[in-house]
Amino acid sequence: MISSRGSLFSAVLSPMDPNTAPENNLDLKWRQVLPPGAGLERRGNSSSVRVVLQCLTHIAPLANYMLSEEHSRTCQQSGVCMMCVLGKHTISAFKHSGQIIQPVGVTSLLSRLFPDFKPGLPESSIGFYKAVVEALHQSDLNGRKRNGQTTEDSLVKQIFEGTVQHALTCPACGELHLVFTPFRELIVGTEAPGNVTRDLTWYMMVEQLGFTLQFNCRRCKRSGHSHYKTTFLHLPNVLVINAKPRDEEVTAKTVKPMRYPEDLDMRPFMSQPSAKTEMYQLYGVTVLENYKKDRSHSYCYVKGSDEQWYIMDDDKVSLSNRRSALEQKASLLFYVRSS
Ligand SMILES: [Zn+2]
Ligand SMILES: [Zn+2]
């Protein structure tokens, strides 16, 4: 019914029934305090892949699940299984803390599943994130179907999926139209100097920015474009923010310096006034920098289970601090629900 101009969300799947938003019983906090994961051996120009892998390895709800081996102990999939591959990598990363490992399983699997994927490009961090999460989702669904389990509360849905609501009113008859779209990453196009909280506020006020949606009114049967209001019906447990410049290709030059909080309050952006708080805490930041004229390099900051910030740059892992983590030319931000 509705198509978007200047959509702000990377939609996945088809518009869903908001009532199917999954309940979850994940551990959002670390079940154990672990040293930081291993450094990842530098191979080719794929630092943009390694940083996402490091962030995913240090996201508590996903890491807790992978370290529990809940999936891999019972997995009977005959083909490649991303859940098993990432699980094995996560276990190896923490087992070899202080050392260097090769994430060969994950990267080789991706090149088989996604032949068009090009790890050397600056935008490949977000491409890799999306590819891994989709591959996890498919593996998890296959396993659940095989075991006769429901697929409504798949791991990826529980961890990464939220639902955005677009609301518009037909200018002719006043009928309210609501469209719900699931998302696994939130794009807040930044303008220099970027500011995540301000950009979120702008997007929630998108009707004032001139974006419109095309619609066909079910009541009066008229069609046209109308301004709309965007809010969140349901937020994911892990909120991934893509600080991509608005309408620009991602390069180290176009990623702008930006401000992003360690604690992010999403309650002002909800569709319904929420009685509960919607607080998120920053656990991962990927950074894109130019290291040669037309080449970029990525490194990342992750907050470990010991609440310390670490900088992870390929095979090097060093203790860092909150201030450094919050002052980067960020391209991806990983927030975990804290309340
Ligand atoms: Zn498996
Ligand atoms: Zn109408």
Image (tube, grey):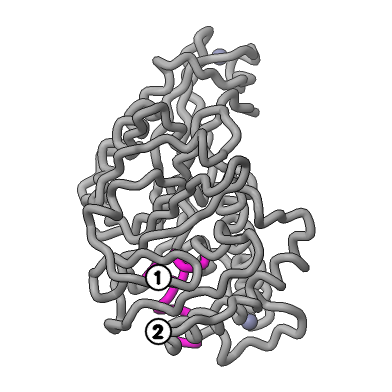
Relative to 175, say whether 70 is above or below.
Answer: below
Q: Please tell me whether residue 15 is drawn above or below residue 114 in the rendered image.
A: above
Where, quadrant-wise, is the N terminus in this rendering?
A: top right
Answer above or below: position of 322 versus 171: below
Select label 2 or label 1 by which is in front: 2
Magenta extent: 53-69
Residue found 40% across the figure and 58% down from its top? 238
| Majority SS type along the magenta span | helix
The kind of residue on which mark 1 rests is His
Identify which residue is drawn at 35% across, 77% down. 36
On the picture, is 190 further left or further right than 280? right
**Amino acid at dot 2:** Ser
At label 2, counting other C-alpha atoms closer than 10 Å, the crowd grade (few under 14, some 14-19, many 20 or more) is some
Observer-nearest of 59 and 68: 59
Residue 183 screen position, x and y as percent: 52, 47
Q: Which mark is residue 97?
A: 2
